[in-house]
Amino acid sequence: MPSKIKILAPSRNLLMTQKQIEAGADEVYFGVESGDFKVYSFSGRYKSMNGVKVQIASYEELKENLDICHENGVSCQLAANMHYIPEELNGEYLEHIKACVSLGVDQLIVSNISLIAEIRKSGIDTPILAGSFTFMPNSEMVKYLESIGVFRVVLPHAMRLNEIAGIKAACPNVELEIFALIGGGNNCGRCLMFHSPVRKDIGPGCRALYDVNYGGVEYTGKRFLDAAADCALCSMKDLIDAGADALKIVGRESKNEAISAKFTNIFVRFREGVYAGKSTAEIKKDLAADTLFWNMNWLPRFCEDNRCKFHKTEVTESYI
Amino acid sequence: MGTSYRIDSVSQLEQTLEQFPDMDCVVAGHESCPVFYMQQNVDEIAKRALDKKIGVKINIPIVFEEYLDFFKGEAARLLEEHQQIKLVANDWGMLYHLHSQHPKRKFAIGLGMSFSYADCPWNFHIVEGELDKYKEMLLVHNLASTKALEIVKGLGADEIIMGNMKSLEASYRIIQSCGLKVTVNRGVNIVTISRACHTLRILGKTSEKGNCAAYCKNRTILKGTHYYDMSLGIHAAISEETKAIQPEMHSYSNMLFTSGEQEGIDHSNVADVINDYRI
């Protein structure tokens, strides 16, 4: 019998890791502070965002997180997915990875093809998964990544179910990880609209309001770039059938560790329902019956705003 | 230094030839929209340009899986029917495929794969507050390392199309010194590429997809007014100070870009410029 689809949850400190484990996560991913960065990090994300530290603070703390995960049978991914590292920083980047690997990190998230090569050349043989910033819209790219030793890929936000199935058919030995919660309106790795760690009112550019002048006609307050599809929950069975191996929940910068774990637990409970043969409607009814979080947070944020990743919505209908 | 022009119709080719009879090359196709590509008459553009002894580059757009078979076939056909053209790959998968099928041919890497945060004034804020030694990580072109360029050359690329920014001068030099040709697109600096066509969505015209190229001809300018606070789930006004650093942006099919040209960019390591004014 094939193993269950994995649920991968974010963490940024020991409390969040504990909460995610209690919530039922199979895998946890985190970034770790290193060097003397003031704003950024090697994990492809900022040190902090809106007052929330996004990285695990030290290698000592990393060890605590790894120990508790491994005691509970949970795998750990290190986010080392900076888009690009100039050659003069290669040494520092590799030393950081080696330090984390020596403590027991199970997998590395890397998002640059030349960095994958550098990591292997340095003798680090920890399994590598190609992060979303690598951007792999088709099976030829996945084949290429497989040829350079990648074991799993994180597919772009805006994939269709038939495309996921097509990639799986073409590359059956590569694991496919799907963003299941919180998306982005643009192609990962080809969006330069970075949120700002120093200017709160930059925000995610794809979700901002814009005044638009189209052919001389003015439109005000438009969510012009907002093609973010955030939620794949109801499509879990379809994703399993398509060959997805893992579902990724975003949110290292989530302000409340317990709330982040609630998102994870919704996915875990939904999965239980799917493998028990329940329909989506039945599972959602169960969630609505005894989960205040579902009614007060999930429904308005995702369902009522039509943020479905794999259902027909205004956003998915606009996909080219 | 060669001079190319981005062309998306036969009539535009004729007009451009009349105005700039010394042009060296046309650049057709599209970096990111397969639907726009399919509405061009790429073959006729190529044929007419080649007849006039003008070079031809064709952008194969970023190919999502459902378009893969089509563009594999399209690429094979173009290379067979128009031997002299050069294909421009805009995603690694297509480059990998092209090289595996045509190991002796050379390809260019397009703006779908070639970028830097420094390309776009939207990102100037990113380096605020960071140590100088790490700023490079945020400013340098994504392919400007010897290892990345080795990989790129190993996959059959001999040319990289890049944005046109003063901050990229060092990257031009690095790439050129590694034996690849640098081509600079003068007109546009891409900010984002999406799977979604924003124009069709906002106009409520997604049903016209496939017959929609005309909507891209209208100039679309965006100015941010409110940012989104993810933690609160609300929109709030962008301050005047932040508005001042955000660039005016233009939307075109599923791309967002800034346009215009900085002054005094050193093109001594640049082999070719593409004139591309999509607005």
Image (tube, coloured by chain):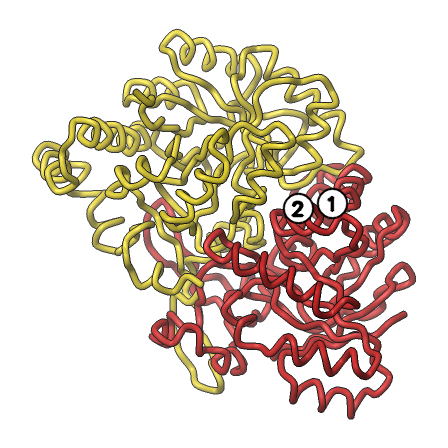
Chain colours: A yellow, B red
As displayed, is residue A288 above or below residue A311?
above
Q: Quick check: B275 left or right of B189?
A: right
In the picture, which quadrant includes the C terminus of chain B?
bottom right
Which of the chains bears the disc numbered 1?
A: B
Same subunit, labels 1 and 2: the answer reads yes
Which residue is drawn at the image coordinates 83% and 50% (left, top)?
Answer: B175
Question: Which residue extends farthest left?
Answer: A289
Q: Which residue is mark 2?
A: B96
Position of residue A197 measured from the top left corner of the image (x, y, whole percent): 54, 44
Instruction: Determine if residue A39 is in view.
Output: no
Position of residue B266 measured from the top left corner of the image (x, y, whole percent): 88, 63
- Tag on residue A299? none
Q: Residues within 10 Å of mark 2 (few under 14, many from 20)?
A: many
Q: Residues within 10 Å of mark 1 (few under 14, many from 20)?
A: some
As displayed, is residue A274 above or below residue A229?
above
Q: Which residue is mark 1?
A: B155
* Identity, as a three-letter code, of the amino acid under mark 2: Tyr
